Image: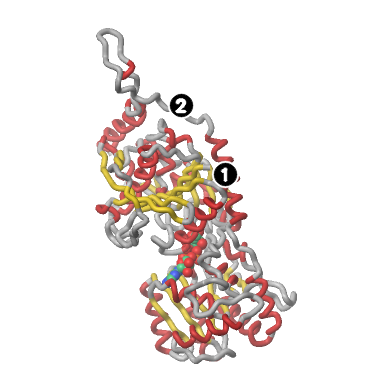
Amino acid sequence: MKILMISPEIAPYSKTGGLGDAVAAMAKYMAAHGNEVRVFTPAYGSVRRDETWHRYEEPVRVELGYGMHSDCAVWETNFCGATVSFVEYNYFFGGNEIYSSRPDDAHRFAFFGKAAIDYCEQINWIPDIVHCHDWTTGLVPALLNTRDNWRRIARAGIIFTIHNLQHQGYAPKSVLEYLGLPWGLFTADNYESLGGVCMMKGALYHATKITTVSPTYSYEIQSSEQGFGLDHVLRHRAGDLTGIINGIDYGEWSPRTDKLIPANFVPENFTGKDICKAELQRESRLAVRRDIPVFGVVSRLAEQKGLDLFAAALPNLLDRAEMQVVLLGSGNPALESTFRRLAARYPAKLAVSIGYNNRLAHMIEAGSDFFVMPSRFEPCGLNQMYSMTYGTPPIVRTTGGLVDTVTAWDPATPGAGTGISFHDADVGAMTWAIERALKLYFDYSDDYYKVRMNGMNRDFSWDRSVEEYERVYREAMEARKGMFPPPPPPEIKSVKKKSGAPAAAEKPSAKAAAKPQKSAKGAATKKSATR
Ligand code: ADP
Ligand code: GLC
């Protein structure tokens, strides 16, 4: 299959969290399965260019609303068998940030989505599947169903993947006019929400198939508790919604080969892991003690991750338990300073690094004895899979992908389990979970060994998930078959007009065939004037 992925992040070029990792690995493994994959993504100022990049020789013309257009450049490179196409348009993407607090952030990404469509058409690369990732790509399905529905790319099956339903992309309604989308989309059962445009909501109505990143999350988001106001839409589309768990990219995250840790290791021999632990303790200025468990955290410091519960539980635990904590994260300023204050109060037990540091993230996965991930909700979560792979049992809340990937240890069933699970999102339950981990470490050492082994021997490879995506792709292509009339014939420029009968050159051109779009645009302008 020819697959176009549209994503605001792809690691290692751009990443704020798991989305960048997931898209990169998905593209790589899809390509390894014999698919032709192109990932369209912005060339932010922070993306490191190199000599493998080639610029598409012509300017890429992006058709916008009001008959306007903008030219941009597209650079391409090969990434593990997939092509990555970077759109360069400095007015929107010249800065270093991926998501910005600019008032025109939605317009930035609206432009990006339209550029993806127009670029594929311009280079005559017509995919079977257009796979959109998260809210930034939310207007693409509507473009393919309305304004651009006469183009060949519109025959592709449209997949929309929810990586995180909390971030939906609220935009001023002018974003529809900006792309020349019809005003008919501005209704409550489409893109309208609270007087503005909700990019994710409309995408859920327009996509041929919807996926999210774990089976449990696919059910949770259909409930009012976890639906973030879109549960009714997801219930409406339930028949087209599938939860497919992310895998991990063992090329990047494997204790056998990881180049970012001081020693490699395998399940049969933990000598390397002991070295990683000692080095992590040394780097974190904690006592180098093999007999004290290290609890690691690598996370965005956002409400989603529940680390405020961990912060609240820590003083009581650190006052009485033999334990060390190494935390790496950034995000919510209040939570950052809470952790800084705690680190100042417990310098011998708690090391806190505020910021983003990929090497330290690998060190923490490898050198810790437990990994703490008390998420309030977690669509999939990659860190718990990384930690199991590195022999570091995770401590997780029973939510979303954490349910689907971690099996709870229970002293009643010795030798089973891959981590510690707890249910309630409160400080009492968080404390209970850490105490349970301490018990496993100090009192059940045989079981601790087995739990680590069980985790390391789990298979989190992408292969199975790629097959599931391919199945959804095929269903989407089937569902989309025959949806739209055949594209108009190409313009024949060489035929000269004779007097009398119209010449072949006057056959409707591609642009003329876009009539519905034009009238929609006209209607849009009229309507907006009266709004
Ligand atoms: P989410 O995408 O919700 O943040 P995931 O568990 O899916 O959660 O993915 C998080 C990814 O981001 C992991 O690869 C993790 O190592 C990385 N990460 C998060 N915070 C940091 C940080 N401060 N420094 C380095 N890597 C980080
Ligand atoms: C989002 C989710 C996370 C998931 C990641 C990749 O960032 O918060 O749970 O693992 O996307 O799909």
Percent position of residue 514, x then y: 35, 29
Q: Quarter holding the C terminus?
A: top left
Percent position of residue 78, x then y: 43, 53
The one nearer the camera, 297 or 436, is 297
The one nearer the camera, 323 or 495, is 495
Which residue bears the numbered disc 1? 240
Percent position of residue 266, x then y: 62, 75
Q: Is residue 358 left or right of residue 234?
A: left
SS category of the residue bearing label 1: helix
Marker disc for residue 486: 2
Residue 399 appears in which quarter of the rendering?
A: bottom right
Q: What's the CA distance linking mark 2 and mark 1?
A: 26 Å
Residue 395 in view of the camera: no
Q: Earlier in the sequence, mark 2 or mark 1?
A: 1
Residue 98 appears in which quarter of the rendering?
A: bottom left
Amino acid type at circle 2 is Pro
Residue shown at 31%/19% (left/top)?
Answer: 505
Q: Is residue 247 above or below residue 2?
A: below
Percent position of residue 477, x then y: 54, 38
